[in-house]
């Protein structure tokens, strides 16, 4: 159902709606007419307020839990509030300094990404997430070591010194010395190339007849390169920190929701797929409750922003996952600032 434009609400309904949402985001509890008519509330009788609340409920913006006479914003109501009413609160100078110092601390980029996830968790009281750039390693050396008949261990050394192992099925009728021949070929001809570049060069040399390898060895080269290329595409590279923050005092009211959320956080591939939607966004994306299938049952929200290198290319996504009562006004600009700060470091 399309979200109702905020301009279609009367000024009285808009004010009551704002107070209900802000009360819910502060306490996590339903907001009733007595609260709204109390000190700091709206100057209307409880009966008049109840009438407006009923109208807002009929519009699908509020809901009344069966255990309480108060109202909670629906996902559609939260979307209306975020898009039409919320006033963002930019990070303070102190918060900006903390974010920049933690991200720029000396150490490898992986440490900065870990720090970013923990930082977002601490500042938002939610779970901080960082989708790591899917860096395709450049080959320095590859060695094929026989394991058993029909199988070999492919040991790849990247130009950054990283070492990874994969098991490769061997072609039938592999000639003696083929493993050494293939290892030497890859290391000599393809060093310094990415996996995609190495595979493309190999295919070109084979198709043009420029390769000195026999058919079985050519097949083995392609298998050795493909095993990493496929793995890089399928592997969700995600850092999640701060799940314990989701177990606050309000969790006792809805243990089933929290249990569902923690289960969702274990499915890193699905989270990576969700965050990947934010890669093409020009600014911070907000997914509220049922707007995304992954967290629909747990009633959780995701605030995510892409971060770019100095050439403007999107290399990853940072974000916060938490209950729908996240402090959107504070967390949205904080995630955006963190993404921009991380982008400066990536270079």
Image: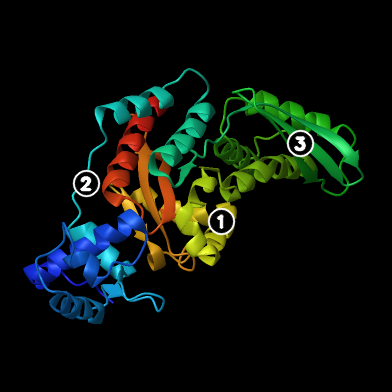
Give the residue pinned by disc 3: 154
**Secondary structure of residue under mark 3:** strand
Residue 115 locus on image (x, y percent): 48, 31
Mark 3 or mark 2: whose residue is earlier in sequence: 2
Q: Is residue 95 left or right of residue 56?
A: right
**Secondary structure of residue under mark 1:** helix
Could you tell me which residue is drawn at 23 percent across and 38 percent down? 90
Total numbered labels placed on residues in the image: 3
Q: Are marks 3 and 1 in contact (CB under 8 Å)?
A: no
Which tag is nearer the camera, tag 3 or tag 2? Answer: 2
Residue 240 locus on image (x, y percent): 53, 44
Label 1 Cα crowd, 10 Å radius (few <14 / some 14-19 / many 20+): some
**Secondary structure of residue under mark 2:** loop
Q: CA distance from mark 1 to mark 2?
A: 28 Å
Residue 49 locus on image (x, y percent): 16, 74
Q: Are marks 3 and 2 in contact (CB under 8 Å)?
A: no
Between 214 and 61, the one nearer to me in the picture: 61
Q: CA distance from mark 3 to mark 1?
A: 36 Å
Could you tell me which residue is drawn at 59 percent across and 50 percent down? 234
Give the residue pinned by disc 2: 88
The answer to whether 274 is drawn above or below residue 151 in the figure is below
Mark 1 or mark 2: whose residue is earlier in sequence: 2
Residue 8 locus on image (x, y percent): 10, 72
Between 154 and 326, the one nearer to me in the picture: 326
Mark 3 or mark 1: whose residue is earlier in sequence: 3
The answer to whether 345 is drawn above or below residue 308 in the figure is above
**The C terminus - image quarter:** top left
Could you tell me which residue is drawn at 20 percent across and 78 percent down? 50
Q: Which mark is residue 262?
A: 1
Label 2 Cα crowd, 10 Å radius (few <14 / some 14-19 / many 20+): some
């Amino acid at each position: 159902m399309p979200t109702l434009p905020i301009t279609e609400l009367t000024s009285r309904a808009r004010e009551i709606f704002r107070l209900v949402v802000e009360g819910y985001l502060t306490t996590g509890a339903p907001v009733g007419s007595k609260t709204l008519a109390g000190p700091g509330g709206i100057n209307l009788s409880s009966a008049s307020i109840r009438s407006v609340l009923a109208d807002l409920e009929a519009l699908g913006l509020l809901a009344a839990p069966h255990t309480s006479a108060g109202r909670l914003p629906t996902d559609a109501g939260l979307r209306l509030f975020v898009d039409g009413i919320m006033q963002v609160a930019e990070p303070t100078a102190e918060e900006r300094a903390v974010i920049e110092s933690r991200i720029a601390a000396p150490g490898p980029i992986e440490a900065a990404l870990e720090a970013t996830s923990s930082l977002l968790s601490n500042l938002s009281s939610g779970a901080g997430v960082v989708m790591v750039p899917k860096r395709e390693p450049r080959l320095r050396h590859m060695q094929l070591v026989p394991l058993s008949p029909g199988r070999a261990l492919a040991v790849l050394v990247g130009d950054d010194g990283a070492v990874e192992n994969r098991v490769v099925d061997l072609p039938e009728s592999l000639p003696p010395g083929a493993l050494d021949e293939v290892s030497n070929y890859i290391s000599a001809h393809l060093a310094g190339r990415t996996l995609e570049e190495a595979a493309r060069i190999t295919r070109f040399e084979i198709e043009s007849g420029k390769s000195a390898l026999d058919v079985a060895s050519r097949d083995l080269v392609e298998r050795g390169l493909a095993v990493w290329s496929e793995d890089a595409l399928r592997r969700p590279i995600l850092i999640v920190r701060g799940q314990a923050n989701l177990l606050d005092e309000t969790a006792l009211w809805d243990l089933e929701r929290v249990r569902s959320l923690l289960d969702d956080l274990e499915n890193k591939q699905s989270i990576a797929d969700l965050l990947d939607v934010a890669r093409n966004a020009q600014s911070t994306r907000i997914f509220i409750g049922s707007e995304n299938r992954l967290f629909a049952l747990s009633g959780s929200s995701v605030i995510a922003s892409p971060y770019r290198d100095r050439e403007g290319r999107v290399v990853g996504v940072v974000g916060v996952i938490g209950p729908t009562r996240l402090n959107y006004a504070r967390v949205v600009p904080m995630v955006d600032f963190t993404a921009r700060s991380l982008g400066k470091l990536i270079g």
